[in-house]
Image (spheres, coloured by chain):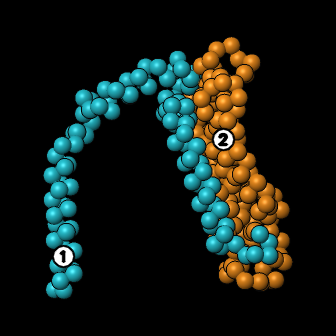
Chain colours: A cyan, B orange
Amino acid sequence: MKPLKLLGLITVIITGFFLLYGVNDMPRWGDTNTPASVHVSPYYIQHSQADTDAPNFVSAVLADYRGFDTLFETTVIFCAGIACMMLLRKEEDA
Amino acid sequence: MINRYDNLIIEFFCRIIAAPLFLFGVYIIFHGEASPGGGFQGGVILGAGFIMLAIAYGMDFTLRRIREKMILFLSCIGVFIYGGIGAACLLWRGNFLDYGKLPLPVDSVSAIRGLGIMGIEIGVGLTVMGVMISIYYDLIDPGGIQPDMLSGEE
């Protein structure tokens, strides 16, 4: 085995060990005592109806509480369209 | 390049399903506030409607309905609506994207926020629709100059 590949293998094994070791500290799936579940989620569930009049609180989080995120999601999609246009479109009818 | 040929079944089915499909897309966008859905999903449905027309009836038919410049204009307008609603909140002394400060003729602040959500869903839907159709038009473009492509039978 070439030395560079051996080095890569050792790096992957060590990094994988640390990643798997870190997984131990992650909260269990569906655990209700995680910071995300005790801090913001109850607020959104209890107050989004009164704050936004939106019965669907996924929409309220997506478009109101996290509106900045969604704005740039839209911008990313727009940029993807522009990039496809630049790469694929013929020039004479651009 | 595969040329299209007339297929009665496909054209008839697309003619029947086209109008309900567009109506459903608009419904998904406007009802995203109250039920699962929203701008992204509704925009994809609207874009898929135009792509369906392009598959069934050919590009000439679809380009006469919605041109490439119109698509680019719509997707720009979508982002502009979203950013414009956000920036309009600054004019009435709110934070960026703080819809509650907009001077709309609705009695409560929460209703104004709901209308703001609906406004930006429209913007997202227009952008997603435009980008979907635009990518399809670009992919189906055979590249190079092929004059017989432009004068296909209709």
Q: Residue at x 22, y 39 (%)?
A: A27
Residue B20 in view in this figure: no
On the image, numbered disc 1 is attached to which residue? A7
| Circle on res. B12 | none
Labels 1 & 2 near each other (Cβ < 8 A): no
Can you say whether A19 is above or below B115 in the image? Answer: below
How dense is the environment of label 2, judged by Cα within 10 Å: few (below 14), some, or many (20 and up)? Answer: some
Rendered location of residue B39, percent (x, y): 61, 42
Q: Quadrant of residue B2?
A: bottom right
Find numbered disc 2 in the image and state the secondary structure of the residue it sits on. helix
**In the rendered structure, which amino acid carries the disc numbered 1?**
Leu
On the image, numbered disc 2 is attached to which residue? B83
Classify residue B130 as left or right of residue A5.
right
Can you say whether B30 is above or below B13 in the image? Answer: above
Classify residue B74 as left or right of residue B114.
right
Q: Quadrant of residue A33?
A: top left
Q: Dot 1 falls on which chain? A: A
Separation of residues labelled 1 and 2 (CA atoms): 49 Å
Between A54 and B102, the one nearer to me in the picture: B102
Q: Residue at x 20, y 49 (%)?
A: A23
Q: Residue at x 54, y 39 (%)?
A: A68
Rendered location of residue B145, percent (x, y): 77, 83
Q: Residue furthest bottom?
A: A2
Can you say whether A91 is above or below A13 in the image? Answer: below
Classify residue B37 as left or right of residue A47.
right
